[in-house]
Amino acid sequence: MKTRAEGPVPWKSSSGKGNEPALQGIWSGTISFSLVAIPVQLAKAVEPGRVSFRMLHSKDYSPLARRMFCPEEETTVPPDEIIRGYEIGPDKYIVITDEELESVSPERSRTIEIVEFIDMKEVDPVYYDHPYYLVPSKGGEKAYQLLVEVMRRTDKAGLAKFVMGEREYLVAVKSTEGVLALITLHYIAEILPYEGISPKDRKIDAEEKNRIKKSIKNMMADFSPEKYADGRRKKIMDLLKKKAKEKAPVEAPQVEEEEGEGPADLVAALKASMRKVKKR
Amino acid sequence: MSRRVVEIAGRRLSVSNLEKDLYPSYGFTKAHILEYYRRIATFIMPHLKGRALTLKRYPEGVDKPYFFEKRCPSHRPAWAKTMEVRRDDGERMTVCLVNDLETLIWVENLASLELHVPLARAGSPETPDSMVFDLDPGDGANILDCARVALILRDLLTELRLSGYVKTSGKKGLHVYVPLNRKETTFEDTKRFSKAVAEIMQKNYPNLVTARMAKEYRKAKVFINWAQNDSSKTMICVYSLRAREKPIVSFPLAWKELENLSKQGDPEKLQVMHSEAVDRAEKQDDLFREVIVKKQKLPYL
């Protein structure tokens, strides 16, 4: 779900934090297992701090639009002429329609069905895809609180399947900082092989090993992410603020403003009509 | 948060926060809003039907932040009618079609006070059913200036044997619609035509009209926004509420009525409130019906 405010929002992303909770639910339904059913909403847990730029035409600062281009005809292709093809070889495609895709999409569902509980320590971070928060809906607060507490104490996570958009996701529901988080996981088929990465020569010198162990021990700290920040982002935002102070922003032309005369016949007819209107 | 389940046309719909005052300086709750749309439904539905709805939601009320939603919210009821459309960039997007009362009540329960729709139907997104002149007063001009422009526009259209229909925007301006309802019409046609009209108006009434969007040209003038004739643009639907201090409606006016109001010279009298809207629509029926029915061809293109 994309939301957008009307008109220009100066420094829409310049707070440098973006930490206002985005509790706008993007999905709502229930978490369920055995006899428990907890109504919840899914909310974003992260907002990537990337500074995004609009591409402009250097001549007049018009924001540029993406168009689908056909190199064969050297022309822009209108949406109703665009279809999907799956590439099976050079210049060979299998065409698939919206209806066909729809027919193999999972049924929409309103539940996050926990099928088993696992130990979160067993899940290698390579499986982590995207984190969300689960927000309790009306009537679900008590059961929600209970699940948060039990899972926090045991470091267990519920493994579940759920459907959002057109996809079925494998997810882990776990307790984080007193709330429930939902992490979408990669399916095993998506994990790339690691064979061949580790060096062939596996001999390890005991003395070397001890030395490394010791250095690590010396450098041990508690994980405190607040110590680190995206330095480049901050520098870009500072630069933009400085530039905004020094110089007014460039403005895009609103529409084609050329005094185009319009079709000759129409203009002549309009002129004649206008004369009559003014005589009334 | 309070919830209630209502049944409309055999479908169950859960509505929430009915007591929430969404027009706090006037006093108009979610319940009032649902009631307004239920009563105006007969008149607004034909104008929403088959069009990709843009929701403009005010969950915390008209004086608090709002957001646009072009995509149909994914937490929609299974019976809500949707359609897959392609955006300009080729991406697909699922949009809501408000084809029945229950869907209308559902989107209103989402506090989508304002209902915005394109000039074309979702099934034929490149074919506008009408051409629009969006009359927007700049600083120092008001709705009475818009009325003057609208009346001149009506006369000009009459000379070209075209019928136009006018409604209040529910904010500061007026909208003049020219029904077309022909599958041969393109946005390129309506844009060229409306732009030529706007320019001739500007030439003949330079102190009253501008055809240019840039703010500096709009001071004390009425901007004829012809660029609304575009497949990517939406207009506030006739009979939709507007998010202002008071629950004012975008409402159709008879030309005679606009002439009279224009003579009286009170800008406030052009605005139609929710209750008056329902009463008047029930009495005079839908003054905007021709906009979606009448077939007209743009001449000289």
Image (spheres, coloured by chain):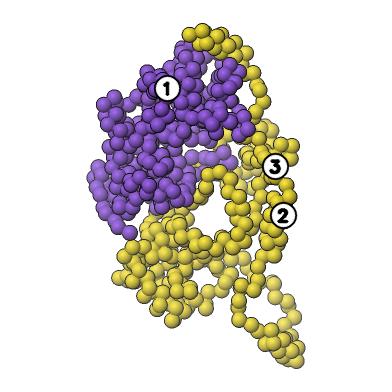
Chain colours: A yellow, B purple
**Mark 3 or mark 1, whichever is nearer to me:** 1
Identify the residue shown where x is 47% and y is 50%. Answer: B65
How much space separates mark 3 and mark 1, taking CA atoms? 40 Å
State the image coordinates of residue A246 (x, y, percent, origin top left). 73, 50
Q: What secondary structure is found at the residue carrying circle 1?
A: helix
Image quadrant of residue B243? top left
Q: For the point 69% across and 84% down, which residue is it?
A: A219
The foreground one among A25 and B92 is A25
Kindly identify which residue carries mark 1: B262
Marks 3 and 2, how far apart in space? 15 Å
In the picture of the structure, the residue carrying the numbered disc 3 is: A250
Residue B213: image tag: none
- For label 2, the residue is A242
Where residue A225 sits: x, y (%)?
61, 73
What residue sits 64% from the left and 18% below the top?
A261
Q: Position of residue B273 (x, y in %)?
A: 34, 35
Disc 3 marks which amino acid?
Val
Which type of secondary structure does the marked residue at label 2 adopt? Answer: helix
